Image (tube, grey):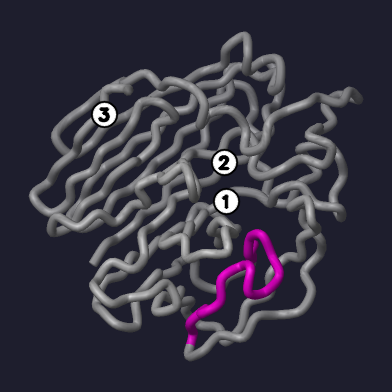
Amino acid sequence: MNNMITLENGILTAKVNPWGAELTSLKLDGMERIWEGDPAIWGRHAPTLFPLIGRLIGQQYELDGEMISAPMHGFCREREFEVVSQSADAVTFRTRNSTDSLAVYPFRFTLDITFTLEGNTISKRHTVTNHSAQPMPFELGGHDAYRTTLMPGEVMGDYAIAFEGIDHLEPYGMDENGVLEEQKGFIPLENGLLTKLPEDVGLDTIVLGDLPVRRATLLSRKSARKVTVEFDDFPYLGIWTAQKGVPTNYICIEPWSALPDGHFMGRRLTDKPGIVVLEPRESKTLTFRSAFE
């Protein structure tokens, strides 16, 4: 077991694991709001996706005319981060390129992740710096799983996700391997609420772009408990929970900087919609926030 970092501000108490710089617990009024990571359902809590999001076609991408094999969601969720700074209500973690990372992503980089408690909100700030001599493309995303069925008598069907300013969603399609297809069809909202899980609409993940407001609220229609995720720096959003045939009691709301691999894209990382490319010595910061009630 790694040494958990505990953050407190009198309202929230959070625990972050240096392994993957992963938020593993967030309590408000003593109630746990982050999925506990039951391995029989899904053994993670809130991993960071970098430098890739999702599955690659054939587990490969093209760089400078060569095909490179790389794991799903990148490699940061499977490595120990260094603690750079820490206070009562904030902590910054850092990881950098290694021999293993260069084999699947041949760029020199640092990734700093800062968690900060502010009132009833936890922010997650990611700063990526390119230390290579050439431009560096990357993707970055969250995968935070928020608990449902918080109050006695609730069932997962009591939970919904509210989107502002729209009456329907236009998700990307997805094949049986989780690879994106072009947008087709739509999901109607009930008074601005998404009441369906991905499996209900025949998708592994509901992948969205072009939302008029980069904010989504997971709420219960039986209680006042909710969490609002604001993701101004992220143009895409994933909605996911494991398909187990039983209620999982969590839903992931995932801000993404770029789209995962798709059949309508080229094989290079730079072909992906939303891809960020850093020039040598350039940095980019992407932040999302989760406010709990």
**What span is in magenta?**
192-209
Mark nearer the viewer, 3 or 2: 3
- The earlier-in-sequence mark between 1 and 3 is 3
Residue position for label 2? 140
Residue position for label 1? 256
Kind of element beneath mark 1:
strand
Residue at 52 percent across and 26 percent down: it is 78
- Amino acid carrying label 1: it is Trp
Residue 194 is a magenta residue: yes
* Looking at the image, residue 193 lies above or below residue 17: below
Q: Nearer the viewer, residue 60 or 38?
A: 38
How far across and down, in percent of the image, does residue 164 sit? Answer: 47, 79
Quadrant in the picture for residue 14: top left
Residue position for label 3? 4
Kind of element beneath mark 2:
loop
* Looking at the image, residue 94 lies above or below residue 171: above
Q: Is residue 225 left or right of residue 43?
A: left
Residue 225 is a magenta residue: no
The answer to the question of whether label 2 and label 1 lie on touching residues, with beta carbons closer than 8 A, is: yes
Kind of element beneath mark 3:
loop
Q: Residue furthest top?
A: 99
The answer to the question of whether label 3 and label 2 lie on touching residues, with beta carbons closer than 8 A, is: no
How far across and down, in percent of the image, does residue 1 sit? Answer: 32, 23
- Amino acid carrying label 2: it is Leu
How many angstroms separate mark 3 from mark 2 (CA)? 23 Å
- Amino acid carrying label 3: it is Met
Q: Residue furthest left?
A: 10
